[in-house]
Image (cartoon, rainbow, N blue to C red):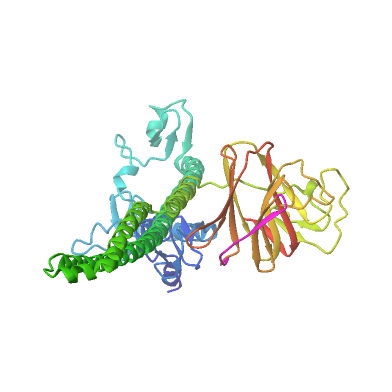
Amino acid sequence: MASIDLRDELSCSICLNIYTDPVTLSCGHNFCRDCIGRVLDTQDQAAVFSCPDCRAEFPEHPALHRNITLRNIAERFLSTRPELTSEVSCTYCLHSQVPALKSCLHCEASLCEDHLRAHSKSPEHVLSGLLTNPKSIKCSIHKKILEYYCSEDAACICVYCSARLHRGHKLEMVDEASIKKKDRLRKVLDTLTSKKEQIDKRHKSLQERRKKEQKKAAGLNEKVMDMFRDLRRHLDDLEKKVLNEIFRQEEQVTASFSKLIHQVQEEKDELTKKLAHVEELYHTADPLTVLQEQESERDDFCDIDEAGDDDCREDDKKKKIVWDPDMILITKSLHSLSEMIRHMRRGLYLQTSTDIVLDISTAANDILISDDLKTATSSQVNENRPKTPERFREYQVLSLTSFSAGQHFFEVDTSDSNSWRVGVCYPSISREGDQFMNGKNEKSWCLRRYEKVYSLNHNKRATNLGHRITCHRFRVYLDYGAGQLSFYELCDPIRHLHTFTSTFSEPLHVLISVFQGSVTITN
């Protein structure tokens, strides 16, 4: 009963056999390496990994740790119960397949427990461990048990073969030769197992890289979709803005024409009345009536002449009222659109950020630099670094890397500070004095935050941002050859804040100023 219980503890729940090269999952359950490997390969298609016993789920392909202690226990158990390793059936149980326990070399038969008790006990009936084919351990020529192993001919031989056919050869007992070969096989097995583990690691690494690339592609897909959504919104806003401006100008010109048309209509009506009166007078038969209207007629004629002059002047005015649409707004809108497309191209094609670390030899003594050289923190404790020409008097630190060509960008996280400046500068910037601060001289450009106010600074000139900042992560993009330095807010979608344009004459270093809290370079 104890043997049966132990066998249950040493059986793989997948193949139901004694463990072969057992491995352990992080949940604590054990399986044959090949068995759990096939199960996990099947689960890999669904990208969901779980333990077949407890159904515990793993976020990625679980690591398989060899359980050497359990393997040794299983091997020792099998060595004491050889019948468990074989599927050989009793030769004499014809009506059912009963597992055999021993083999008789004389009968060349395998025996179950019942037939073993009834088997002959005579000396020629030699019992051995269970054999799949009892004939295989006898010499095919002399029909004697194969007791020796000839290493020169790599053959198992009987006592007669050793005295005749293999005289003078190096011989060993079969058991001894088997032990030596098993030792060699164990080394081969360990080598193959090590190689398989390496292959498993490579397989896992490739799967992780594939998922990483898929995630990258999904991120790029989402980024492009966000960009085009933002572009469509921008186009809609520009269209409405331009159409409203055209409509406003049209209304203005139309009102001018309507006023002029009304004036001309009034003059036309007045002229029609005068024309009717003169025509009536002209057709009057009574001479006295015609003569009595003489003064009035003269006045009417004078009015007509004057009206004619006015008409000429009004014609001149009408020639001047020609609609010339204001193209300035349209041009600005198209320029804004081209700028947006240019920034989109930057966002799409410049995917790899530049690795930036801070140069502690330039850090002011009130700035604490992290061990990874990525974070600058305002400190109330003097760091007592040696005074050198490269070190800033206070607040600031340069990057170790400089840029003198090409396109580069870096990103910062400012969530732990409400007073800072982030930008670039020439290495010749002053380290102390009145103009060493980032953005307060012609050698530096920066984005600045002071409390809740954000501004762009260069050469003592500051431009406040007109919209509300919604996050604390920013990207600084440098196109050295084009002479452009751009700042972006890394919200969703990414928002362009400002672009400085200049002709750079020296290499540019990243320059960070911290007055409270800390600023971290995140790439």
Q: Is residue 269 magenta?
A: no
Q: Relative to residue 451, is residue 398 depicted above or below?
A: above
State whether residue 47 appears in this view. Answer: no
The image quarter containing residue 240 is bottom left
How many numbered discs sit on the rendered protein? Answer: 0
Considering depth in this image, is 302 or 407 the residue closer to the camera?
302
Q: Which residues are magenta?
A: 459-469
Considering depth in this image, is 262 or 458 the residue closer to the camera?
262
Tell me the residue at 18%/70% (across/down): 288
Q: Is residue 461 magenta?
A: yes
Q: Is residue 316 left or right of residue 292?
A: right
Tell me the residue at 51%/42% (across/down): 187
Q: Is residue 277 left or right of residue 217?
A: left
Q: Relative to residue 299, is residue 333 depicted above or below?
A: above
Q: Position of residue 423 (x, y in %)?
A: 66, 51
State whether residue 501 appears in this view. Answer: yes
Q: Position of residue 366 (x, y in %)?
A: 82, 58
- The rendered magenta stretch, by its main secondary structure, is classed as loop
Tell me the residue at 68%/66% (across/down): 416
Q: Position of residue 319 (x, y in %)?
A: 34, 51
Residue reaching furthest to the front: 288
Q: Which of the image's four quarters has the N terminus?
A: bottom left
The image quarter containing residue 414 is bottom right
Q: Position of residue 53 (x, y in %)?
A: 41, 70
